[in-house]
């Protein structure tokens, strides 16, 4: 395990330092237009539309069953949409079989051909394109070098670690100079450390080659750290497509807000004129929330401030040291627990049991119907 | 305090170790006893047959009338049956696994039928309905053997397919530009080698041992020849059957050894009769 980890690190370094690879292909745009797909009674996709610019990496993020994998498989040609179309560089590819779409795909489960060593796996797509043996071997060797696995070229999949296998799979997908790179949760089967390294490696390679990439994941950290834009999906629809920072700071819906990052729910009361009363103070509410009824106000842990106060509105119930910051759990109005990020130096004074005053931000907050 | 902890620690570790050692000590006795009983059970009849045939019968069995034609007929039937069965069963099993997984159980049920139906019933039925042109050729017998071999072949191939991530492999292959046939030939068949060899082993053994159907279809295959010849010269016939046993056994050993060696290279398992498990990926 230890050796594998160093391998992966070395590979990351090697990639960062090398010049752009030969034959990099740029400029393929992908449009998903109004895609719908049913499996029996379940609607996997329900009128999903997405535009991916040339060279862009878009991540589809969502809980399992939200339709993200179905969307990817429709682009790959493994599934067909009941309605809607997929345009690659403006051309509808609905009738084109997967084998003729020129898409490189990396799968969640290990997909290397067990009967071929690493070089032959990487060269498989080139062989299908009738490239000569010598040329093919050379190109495959170049790609293996690119993912930092030159020494493993002659090894069979069963002799490679999971991380190495996924890197070979990545090299194999890139070998055919795909118009679009499709990544179907390629890191989920790996352990945390390898996942982190491979994440950087994939992103570096993708940026260097400029390959338009669609990346499906249920891991928000992965999506936020790798993608140019992230599309959050729910129930076969895209809730919001935005750059990671925007998604985090300005979530369009309560679902996005709570799916991405940690979010506190504070019981509030709507007032007329677009304000909401929460923790005894009236703050402006963001547009798009409910107009009446019991509501919750959504605030991030770093959006709240707390200070010790004997007659405060909350009591510290727990603390988790995270390094520079400490996440403090505060009990407010009896049974509501909220989490507040506090610089660790200030948090030292807030032992469990301390009475604190919780203060809200002054900028508009996201309001949503109260969950029962 | 520390020493107490250590003492508890060692005692708890010693417990199972001691038990395991005890198990190891008592196990060989049983193992040898079972091996001995099984050995006597299998070898005694062979020894009796050898005694009965006499060693000189082995020298002359090869020149007995009908020996070579019968052996050759059985060999041809074995090859024919193996090829037809694999050509039929591999695509069927792959298709069912990939596209109609719901039918897997049904197919399993269907393929078990030839074992349930007595061979006599099967061959009488087949002879009733088969076209005349087929009746006088070994092809008919070969086709019936295909049916007979189906349960074994299907199970071996099914086990092989189950050990592969069939869906991902075929999708990976087609995303790289391979056609269906190319995927079958370059990706699936090489990874099913162990399973195919297992199926072959079973079919060859079946064809070299089948008597009822061959004799009712009036073909002198090797087993039929042994029985017929038995009426002329009993020692010679027993020598022939021991010879057949050795030949088939050698053939199977060769297939198993070659197959296992090749599959080990790519991380596959040993060639077994019903399983073709692939070793797991190591770590991450």
Image (cartoon, coloured by chain):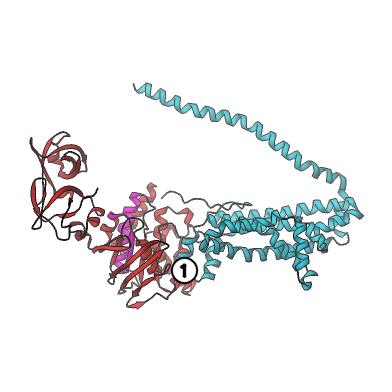
Tell me the residue at 66%/59% (across/down).
Answer: B150
Image x and y of residue A26, in percent: 31, 73
Q: Quadrant of residue B28?
A: top right
Tell me the residue at 39%/47% (across/down).
Answer: A1
Give, as a single range, the part of the protein colored magenta: A191-220
Q: Look at the image and say whether residue A201 sits in the magenta stretch.
A: yes
State the red chain.
Answer: A
Q: Look at the image and say whether residue B109 sits in the magenta stretch.
A: no
Tell me the chief SS of the magenta region.
helix
Q: Quadrant of the N terminus of chain B?
A: top left
Image x and y of residue A235, in percent: 32, 60
* Tag 1 residue: B174
Image x and y of residue A20, in percent: 30, 68
Image x and y of residue A54, in percent: 28, 72
* SS category of the residue bearing label 1: helix
Tell me the residue at 57%/54% (across/down).
Answer: B159
């Amino acid at each position: 395990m230890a050796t594998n980890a160093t391998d992966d690190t070395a590979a990351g370094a090697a990639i960062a330092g090398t010049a752009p690879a030969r034959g990099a292909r740029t400029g393929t745009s992908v449009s998903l237009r109004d895609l719908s797909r049913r499996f029996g009674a379940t609607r996997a996709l329900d009128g999903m539309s997405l535009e991916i610019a040339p060279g862009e990496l878009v991540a589809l993020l969502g809980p399992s069953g939200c339709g993200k994998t179905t969307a990817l498989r429709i682009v790959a040609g493994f599934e067909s949409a009941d309605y809607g179309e997929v345009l690659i560089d403006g051309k509808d590819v609905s009738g084109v079989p997967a084998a003729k779409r020129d898409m490189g795909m990396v799968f969640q489960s290990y997909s290397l051909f067990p009967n071929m060593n690493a070089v032959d796996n990487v060269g498989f797509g080139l062989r299908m394109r009738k490239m000569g043996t010598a040329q093919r071997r050379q190109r495959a060797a170049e790609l293996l070098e690119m993912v930092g696995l030159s020494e493993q070229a002659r090894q069979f999949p069963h002799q490679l670690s999971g991380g190495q296998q996924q890197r070979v799979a990545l090299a194999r997908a890139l070998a055919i100079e795909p118009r679009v790179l499709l990544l179907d949760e390629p890191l989920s089967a790996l352990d945390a450390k390898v996942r982190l390294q491979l994440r950087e490696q994939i992103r570096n390679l993708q940026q260097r080659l400029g390959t338009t990439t669609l990346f499906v994941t249920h891991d928000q950290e992965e999506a936020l750290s790798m993608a140019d834009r992230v599309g959050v999906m729910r129930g076969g629809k895209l809730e919001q497509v935005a750059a990671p920072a925007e998604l985090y700071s300005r979530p369009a819906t309560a679902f996005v807000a709570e799916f991405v990052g940690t979010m506190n729910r504070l019981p509030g009361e709507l007032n007329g004129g677009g304000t909401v009363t929460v923790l005894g103070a009236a703050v402006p509410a963001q547009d798009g929330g409910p107009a009446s009824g019991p509501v919750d106000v959504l605030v991030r842990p770093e959006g709240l401030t707390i200070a010790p106060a004997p007659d405060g509105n909350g009591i510290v119930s727990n603390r988790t040291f995270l390094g520079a910051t400490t996440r403090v759990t505060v009990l407010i109005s009896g049974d509501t627990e909220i989490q507040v990020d506090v610089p660790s130096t200030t948090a030292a004074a807030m032992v469990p049991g301390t009475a604190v005053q919780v203060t809200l931000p002054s900028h508009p907050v996201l309001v949503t119907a109260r969950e029962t | 305090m520390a020493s107490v902890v250590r003492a508890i620690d060692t005692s708890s570790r010693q417990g199972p170790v001691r038990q395991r050692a005890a198990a190891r000590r008592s196990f060989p006795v049983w193992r040898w006893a079972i091996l001995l009983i099984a050995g006597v059970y299998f070898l005694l009849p062979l020894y009796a047959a050898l005694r009965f045939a006499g060693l000189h019968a082995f020298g002359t069995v090869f020149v007995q009338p009908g020996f070579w034609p019968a052996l050759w007929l059985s060999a041809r039937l074995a090859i024919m049956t193996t090829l037809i069965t694999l050509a039929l069963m591999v695509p069927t099993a792959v298709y069912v696994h990939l596209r109609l997984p719901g039918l897997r159980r049904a197919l399993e049920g269907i393929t078990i039928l030839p074992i349930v139906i007595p061979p006599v019933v099967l061959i009488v039925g087949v002879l009733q309905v088969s076209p005349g042109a087929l009746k006088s050729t070994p092809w008919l017998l070969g086709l019936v053997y295909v049916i007979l071999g189906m349960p074994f072949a299907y199970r071996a191939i099914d086990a092989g397919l189950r050990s592969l991530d069939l869906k991902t492999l075929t999708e990976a292959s087609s995303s790289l530009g391979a056609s269906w046939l190319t995927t079958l030939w370059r990706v699936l068949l090489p990874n099913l080698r162990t399973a195919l060899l297992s199926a072959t082993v079973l079919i060859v053994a079946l064809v070299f041992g089948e008597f009822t159907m061959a004799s009712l279809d009036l073909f002198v295959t090797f087993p039929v020849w042994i029985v017929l010849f038995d009426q002329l010269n009993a020692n010679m016939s027993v020598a022939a059957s021991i010879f057949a046993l050795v030949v088939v056994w050698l053939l199977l050993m060769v297939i198993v050894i070659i197959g296992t060696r090749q599959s080990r290279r790519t991380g596959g398992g040993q060639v077994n009769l019903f399983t073709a498990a692939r070793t797991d990926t190591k770590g991450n």
